[in-house]
Image (spheres, rainbow, N blue to C red):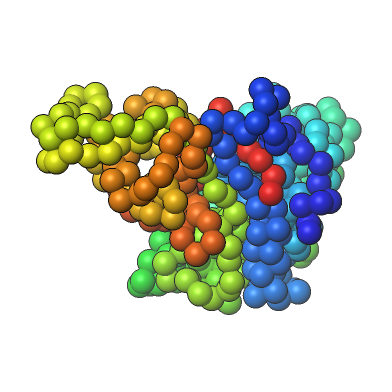
Amino acid sequence: MIADRFDLCGDLAAWPNPIEGRPVKWAEIDAGALAANAGAIAAHVGPDVAVMAMVKANGYGHGAVLAARCMVAGGARWLGVSSPEEAVQLRDAGIEAPMLIVGWSPPSAHRALIAASVDITVYDLAEVETLSVRARAAGRPARVHLKVDSGMSRLGAPLDQVHAILRAIRDAGPHLRLAGVFTHFADADAEDPAFTRYQHERFLPVVDAAGDVDPDVLVHCANSAAALRFPEMRHDLVRPGIALYGYAPPESAGVVPLRPALTFAACVTQVKTVRAGDTVGYGRTWTAERDTRLATVAAGYADGVHRTQSNRGHVLIGGVRCPIVGRVSMDMISVDVSAVDGIGPGDEAIVIGGRDTVHLGADEVGEAGGTVAYEVLCAVSARVPRILV
């Protein structure tokens, strides 16, 4: 099993925990699933296209160091992060794979990133000029990827500034190397691909211009949805995120076999009966229509159970979907367990994930709370120990 190849990392907790026995809440991380998902995507895009595994946001809540190691073992050749701090964390853990920061890197971080062989995203002239000065002082070139705004209207160079930025990179001579050019799609998981195709068409002339600066420039634009759906958009690299953690975007479901890698669970701490007419939780937002058995579960919004799950979400107890009743508190939720027999303190309640054939996916949890699987996974907080399984 691939998990046997890894020591427990700084972003994981040991099992059993130092207190004795299992913790009152925990997230199990399936290392084999992470590696298998990376391998499935790598096989799907083919050997001529590299996978850049996005491990930002603490590996989408799974633990950045573990996720990075698993995905490289599974076939990812690159790693993508959002900030210098995330990049340094991986380098400090001994991870040597090529790495790109897809977000902003402040000038104060440039020298350390150059020394750590981390590629840096640029998107305006002032940034290019500053980075060139820093690279000259560091005595080695900085590898940069030009990010282009092709229609998302977020981070990226406006199309009418691209040629000036490319000239500045070229004129920086030995201090800057144009290692990549990329854009990001706003709507690649939509049923109608028209806007994604529009963005891609706007990006292609930039690719040609970047190739005039460096013929070996790496071209990338495909996130999970585009990598799975649109072969013509794969270019040299694809940048999957959510798919690596086991969740396919809606229009890509079933294209490759994926296994969710995180199970978030917590202990039942009390079971009791409330009478018809009793109210539950802050604000008294739920009233028992009949005598009802309730379980208190040791997970709340400080752990990653969104408050939007109040009176809407479910947990799994004994393989049964049990509704959350009343408001989600900071440390606890109340759950109607009238349909489950024989449970008590210490029994397991699954907030995300499942056992055997019964699952409560992050996508389903997100839908109940009016959000998406990405946010549900990333919200599992640092006080929830990650445990390698």
- The front one of 129 and 115 is 115
Residue 81 visible to an observer of this rendering: no
**Can residue 227 be seen by looking at this rendering?**
yes
Residue at the (39%, 30%) spot, across then down: 270
- Percent across and percent down for residue 234 are 61, 70
Q: Residue at x 25, y 27 (%)?
A: 281
User: Looking at this view, is 30 or 150 the one in front?
Assistant: 30
Residue 45 vs 130, above or below: the answer is below
User: Which residue is at a point 47% across and 71% down the rendered structure image?
Assistant: 253
Name the outermost residue toward the front: 342
Question: x and y percent of residue 225 in the render?
Answer: 50, 65
Picture coordinates of residue 103, whole percent (x, y): 58, 41
From the viewer's perspective, is 297 left or right of 130? left
Seen from the viewer's position, the closer of residues 83 and 162 is 83
Total number of numbered discs in the rendering:
0
Q: Residue 292 in the image: x percent, y percent?
A: 22, 39
Q: In which quarter of the image is the N terminus?
A: bottom right
325 relative to 255 in the view: left or right: left
Residue 30 shown left or right of residue 301 in the figure: right
Q: Residue at x 77, y 38 (%)?
A: 8
User: Does residue 18 sit above or below 345 in this rendering?
Assistant: above
